[in-house]
């Protein structure tokens, strides 16, 4: 494999891991409520921006990151409590529009709380590239990949090994029947927003040292995470992860061999192809169920 | 009120007392002042045609469907402000219409979810009891519930409900969509549960089967209880015979 291709693959994997985390956030909320949360990208933005400003306030990096993640989770909980829960009983489309409104509101709020400039954040552990098979990889990329693998493993264990994780899965299959088991599905929904915000915030913290951040960085990251979820089959967490890497690698290969002008279009071309030829997603199950 | 009172078993503590219950779907009224009682250890059947409001009544008792008027009392307590998931903790457990097992999850996970409100010790104990009662579920415990046959899924749905240790078991159309031999098997299970003195409220289109196993029965027509009597009396009732038993 040429060093050049390896280079593109590494940058694709790094971006893909971020899209995977964002896509997982979409899937988790979709499973709990069939709602597509278009404020998912804003969680990424808040995670990154809050870390940047807490670092600027002089806090040590681990503390700044922890506080930023907690703050983002609080925003996720507030979003569910103040915007989604009061509209309980409204149609799914209404709820989706509410999340679009919330994303615009959060971007506006970010401009007021912070500003409209781009900000950067130092990488976790230095910026001397490491040579892997001729490709040079910044240490932050390894952080992104390592953390993503750890998070995916933790989520897998949570959903497959814990009682509450299985209760969330049961709610995603049939929320009425889940209630008949004694599962509090309102709490499941609240928890899903918190978990999606957590994943978004971590994605924001991980990627900010590589890409810079500002108040609207969440728009594009959110859309790419959404394409990851669609490519993998909406509501299929493992699909969202695979979808994230498909989108990330396709993007970096296009940028490398065709032109970086088309980089952002790749995600949308992939969405269109999937929707035309395999609407249930690459790994989605068909809508049919045995009665 | 008169019909229900006449039919109630004298002297036993009522587990479930429904009075004047009305339910609406939007502006369409589905239940019109339902009165009925189920006493401790009784098996009470509710029979009626498709669309008469049987499932709606069960969903209102379990709390999935809000009541628009009337009261539901469980062991004397008014359930008006108790959410569906909390009614399960109190002991009202419903086996839903059409089985509705969690298809992609394993048989054992389905059973464990049934005991979601119980302590870990009770979960393990419940699994042992269910596997003893339904050996086929033990054999298939690692398989996805959706791969079971219809009859096995019905057994799983009942076992899943029993895992919650119900004080009142609501059974919604357990014979629906099953072959005659399997219907026999399901009613055998119902009889067995009755012998264990589990209080059961059974809703069925199969009036003959349901009334044959029941202590008492009610007949529902277009959202109203029109008859209430002992199981054998209803089986012998000319009106019931003509409308539901095809005699």
Image (tube, coloured by chain):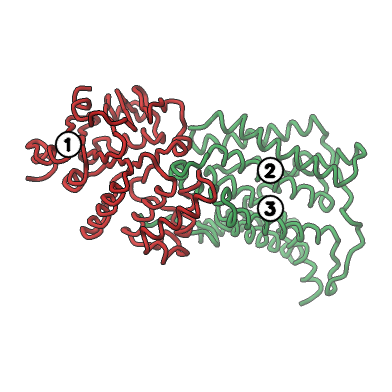
Chain colours: A green, B red
Residue drawn at x 26%, y 28% is B11
Residue A21 falls left or right of residue A146: left
Question: Where residue A209 sits: x, y (%)?
Answer: 84, 51
Image mark 3: chain? A
Q: Are marks 3 and 2 on the same chain?
A: yes
Q: Which image quadrant is residue A147 in?
A: bottom right
Could you say which is closer to the camera, residue B90 or residue B71?
Answer: B90
Residue at the outermost bottom position = A1
Considering only vertical position in the picture, is A166 above or below A92?
below
What's the mark number on residue B230? 1
Q: Nearer the viewer, residue A240 or A125?
A: A125
Q: Residues within 10 Å of mark 2 (few under 14, many from 20)?
A: many
Q: Position of residue A197 (x, y in %)?
A: 68, 43
Compare marks 3 and 2 and give the one earlier in the sequence. Answer: 3
Q: Dot 3 corresponds to which residue? A: A21
Q: Residues within 10 Å of mark 1 (few under 14, many from 20)?
A: many
Residue that label 2 marks: A197
């Amino acid at each position: 494999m040429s060093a050049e291709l390896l280079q593109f693959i590494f940058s694709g994997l790094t971006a893909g891991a971020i899209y995977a985390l964002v896509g997982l956030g979409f899937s988790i909320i979709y499973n709990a409520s069939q709602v597509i949360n278009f404020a998912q990208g804003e969680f990424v933005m808040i995670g990154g921006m809050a870390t940047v400003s807490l670092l600027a306030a002089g806090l040590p990096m681990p503390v700044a990151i922890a506080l930023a993640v907690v703050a983002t989770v609080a925003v996720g909980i507030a979003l569910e409590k103040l915007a989604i829960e009061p509209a309980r009983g409204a149609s799914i489309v209404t709820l989706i529009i509410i999340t679009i409104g919330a994303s615009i509101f959060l971007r506006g709020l970010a401009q007021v709380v912070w500003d409209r400039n781009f900000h950067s954040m130092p990488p976790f552990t230095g910026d001397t590239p490491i040579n892997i098979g001729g490709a040079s990889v910044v240490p932050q990329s390894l952080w992104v990949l390592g953390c993503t693998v750890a998070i995916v493993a933790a989520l897998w264990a949570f959903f497959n090994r814990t009682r509450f994780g299985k209760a969330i899965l049961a709610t995603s299959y049939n929320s009425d029947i889940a209630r008949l088991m004694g599962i509090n599905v309102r709490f499941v929904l609240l928890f899903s927003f918190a978990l999606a915000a957590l994943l978004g915030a971590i994605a924001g913290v991980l990627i900010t040292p590589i890409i810079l951040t500002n108040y609207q960085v969440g728009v594009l990251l959110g859309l790419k995470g959404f394409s990851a979820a669609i490519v993998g089959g909406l509501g299929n967490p493992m699909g969202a992860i695979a979808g994230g890497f498909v989108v990330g690698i396709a993007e970096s290969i296009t940028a490398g061999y065709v032109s970086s002008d088309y980089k952002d279009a790749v995600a949308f071309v992939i969405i269109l192809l999937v929707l035309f030829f395999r609407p249930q997603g690459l790994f989605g199950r068909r809508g049919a169920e045995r009665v | 009120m008169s019909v229900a009172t006449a039919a109630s078993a004298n002297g036993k503590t009522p587990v479930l007392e429904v009075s004047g219950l009305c339910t609406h779907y939007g502006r369409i009224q589905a239940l019109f002042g339902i009165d009925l009682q189920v006493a401790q250890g009784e098996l009470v059947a509710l029979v009626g045609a498709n669309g008469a409001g049987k499932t709606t009544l069960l969903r209102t008792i379990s709390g999935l469907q809000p009541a628009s008027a009337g009261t539901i009392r469980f062991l004397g307590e008014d359930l008006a402000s108790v959410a569906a998931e909390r009614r399960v903790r109190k002991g009202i457990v419903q086996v839903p219409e059409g089985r509705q097992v969690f298809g992609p999850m394993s048989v054992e996970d389905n059973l464990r979810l049934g005991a979601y409100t119980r302590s870990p010790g009770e979960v393990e104990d419940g699994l042992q009891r269910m596997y003893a009662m339904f050996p086929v579920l033990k054999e298939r415990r690692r398989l996805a519930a959706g791969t079971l046959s219809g009859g096995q899924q019905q057994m799983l749905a009942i076992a899943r409900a029993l895992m919650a240790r119900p004080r009142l078991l609501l059974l919604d159309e357990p014979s629906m969509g099953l072959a005659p031999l399997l219907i026999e098997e399901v009613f055998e299970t119902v009889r067995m549960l009755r012998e264990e003195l589990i209080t059961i409220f059974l809703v069925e289109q199969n009036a003959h089967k349901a009334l044959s196993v029941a202590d008492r029965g009610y007949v529902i027509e277009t959202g109203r209880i029109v008859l209430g009597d002992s199981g054998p009396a209803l089986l012998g009732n000319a009106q019931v015979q003509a409308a539901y038993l095809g005699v």
